[in-house]
Image (cartoon, rainbow, N blue to C red):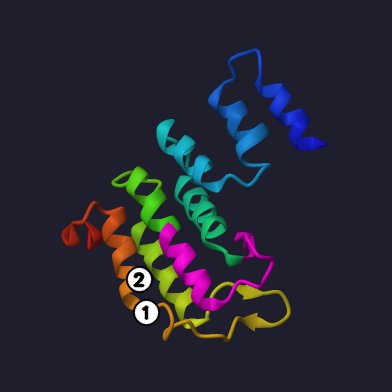
Amino acid sequence: GGTEAALAALGGELHSLAALYNQFAYPYEMWDLCLEMMEFSQYSEQDADEQFIGLWDRLLDPAGFRVVDGSAVTAATAVKEAARRVAEVGARLYPGRSFPIAHVALRLHLLQAGLWPEAPGRGPVQERAAEAAGAETIAEALMKACHESAERCLE
């Protein structure tokens, strides 16, 4: 299959960061690695901020979350998983340009409120996660991403 061929292509030679990004990380939806590669390369093209925001949206979109037992992703589960991703990936990227904290915080709150992401043809998801995954989940994730500094979170 495609995955096996891609893995075989990785072996035997050194690849450029651009090749790793374009041929492996992006096509295989490794959004966290895409963000790290862009941060490492100090990506600064004119569209850099849009690129970072787009990758964070993909990383936080519940449609990409995998559930072990095959059940549907609930709103509460989605908020917890998105918060976990923010804490983990954000901590590796902060204080870099590839971690647009205001945008990421807004996405977490919109996800919690059931207002993001919008599904085609049906508008925002209306299930609210406030009761099961409260604002403290989001605050904790942002604090971890900013290395436990409230001041950094507000920058």
Q: Are marks 2 and 1 in contact (CB under 8 Å)?
A: yes
33 sits to left or right of 96 = right
Write down the quadrant of residue 2 in the picture: top right
What secondary structure is marked by label 1? Answer: loop
Q: Residue 61, image x and y in percent?
A: 57, 63
Few, some or many residues within 10 Å of mark 2 (<14, 14–19, 20+): some
Instruction: Please report the residue visible at 31 percent of the width from the left and 47 percent of the height from the top.
Output: 94
Q: Indicate the amino acid at tag 1.
A: Gly
Instruction: Please report the residue visible at 63 percent of the width from the left and 13 percent of the height from the top.
Output: 13
- 80 within the magenta span: yes
Q: Residue 21, image x and y in percent?
A: 59, 34
Write down the quadrant of residue 1 in the picture: top right
Furthest residue in direction front, as rendered: 69
Q: Residue 15, image x and y in percent?
A: 59, 19
What range is drawn magenta here?
Answer: 63-84
From mark 2 to mark 1, how far is it between C-alphas? 6 Å
Few, some or many residues within 10 Å of mark 1 (<14, 14–19, 20+): some
Where is mark 2, residue-wise? Answer: 137
- 139 within the magenta span: no
Instruction: Please report the residue visible at 45 percent of the width from the left and 36 percent of the height from the top.
Output: 43
Instruction: Please report the residue visible at 30 percent of the width from the left and 74 percent of the height from the top.
Output: 136
Looking at the rendered structure, the number of numbered marks drawn on it comes to 2
Furthest residue in direction right, as rendered: 1
Write down the quadrant of residue 122 in the picture: bottom right
Q: Residue 73, image x and y in percent?
A: 61, 71
Where is mark 1, residue-wise? Answer: 134
